[in-house]
Image (tube, helix red, strand yellow):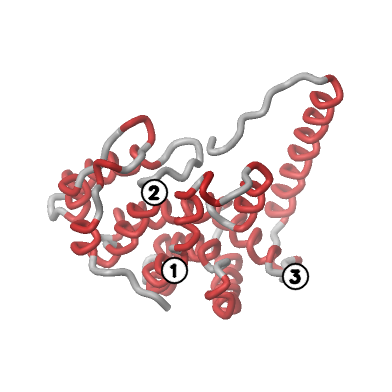
């Protein structure tokens, strides 16, 4: 499994200000270096600015892949709270570029060149997984579960398919102990996608949440059909 370079090497190898970000909020090496500053206030401010630059409407920006590599590379340098925050972001970024998202993108585009940052992020999944994997057994349950939520979409890369049974065991343990709605939903989502029978793992709350989502999907589809039949409505092309 490919491992990431040291975070200082990553920091020095990227022309950060040239990268596309959300809302034209540029990044620079000094800002990113602040994410590992020993002063918690500096660390928090740097992380806030970094996330502000790459988090907007589930879009993968030009800055997202190199920032994801850097964030993954510094996980081992951080205390639990900022590590947890970066793991949550990596999980969201990975989910935004998972296989289902790729299938949706391919309905809109004809070539990977039309959304290069998205496909670049997908190509980084083995590296990012290698950085996240040690935290699957972290002593802190929040860190452990956030690492799993990040690892699940990352493991869809073909080179990581053999690791899915291991991740399925972690997901089953999460479902046996966690009451966090979001984390349970993600664990069940990927177990089902991998063809696992989740019936014995689901709580009444899980089933009720799935029923609510099914109703919402049906309602959206009904409205879309009505707009299509009436010739109305407009649809935005990705990235959103």
Q: Is there a contact, CB below 8 Å, between mark 2 and mark 1?
A: no
- Camera-near label (2 vs 1) is 2
Could you say where residue 167 lies in the image, as x and y percent from the top left? 55, 73
Locate residue 174: give its quadrant: bottom right
Q: State the CA–CA distance, disc 2 to disc 3.
A: 34 Å
Residue pictured at 23% horizontal, 68% vertical: 6
Q: State the CA–CA distance, disc 2 to disc 1.
A: 16 Å
In the picture of the structure, the residue carrying the numbered disc 1 is 129
Q: How many marks?
A: 3
Query: Which sits in the foreground, 215 or 103?
Result: 103
Disc 3 on helix, strand or loop?
loop
Circle 3 residues within 10 Å: few <14, some 14–19, many ≥20: few
Could you say where residue 57 lies in the image, as x and y percent from the top left? 50, 36
Residue pictured at 32% horizontal, 43% vertical: 19
In the picture of the structure, the residue carrying the numbered disc 2 is 64
Decide: is 203 above or below 51.
below
Locate residue 162: give its quadrant: bottom right
């Amino acid at each position: 499994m490919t491992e990431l370079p040291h975070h200082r090497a990553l920091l020095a190898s990227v022309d950060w200000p040239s990268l596309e970000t959300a809302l034209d909020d540029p990044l620079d090496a000094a800002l990113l270096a602040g994410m590992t500053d020993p002063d918690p206030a500096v660390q928090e401010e740097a992380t806030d600015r970094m996330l502000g630059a790459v988090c907007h409407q589930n879009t993968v920006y030009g800055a997202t892949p190199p920032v994801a590599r850097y964030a993954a590379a510094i996980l081992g340098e951080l205390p639990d709270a900022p590590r947890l925050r970066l793991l949550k972001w990596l999980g969201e970024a990975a989910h935004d570029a998972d296989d289902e998202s790729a299938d949706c993108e391919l309905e809109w585009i004809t070539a990977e060149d039309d959304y290069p940052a998205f496909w670049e992020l997908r190509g980084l999944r083995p590296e990012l997984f290698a950085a996240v994997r040690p935290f699957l057994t972290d002593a802190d349950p929040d860190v452990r579960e956030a690492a799993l939520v990040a690892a699940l979409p990352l493991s869809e890369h073909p080179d990581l398919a053999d690791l899915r049974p291991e991740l399925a065991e972690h997901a089953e343990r999460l479902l046996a102990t966690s009451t966090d709605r979001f984390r349970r939903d993600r664990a069940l989502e990927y177990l089902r996608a991998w063809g696992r029978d989740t019936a014995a793992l689901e709580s009444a709350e899980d089933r009720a949440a799935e029923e609510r989502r099914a109703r919402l999907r049906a309602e959206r589809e009904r409205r879309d059909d009505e707009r299509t039949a009436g010739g109305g409505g407009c649809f935005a092309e990705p990235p959103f």
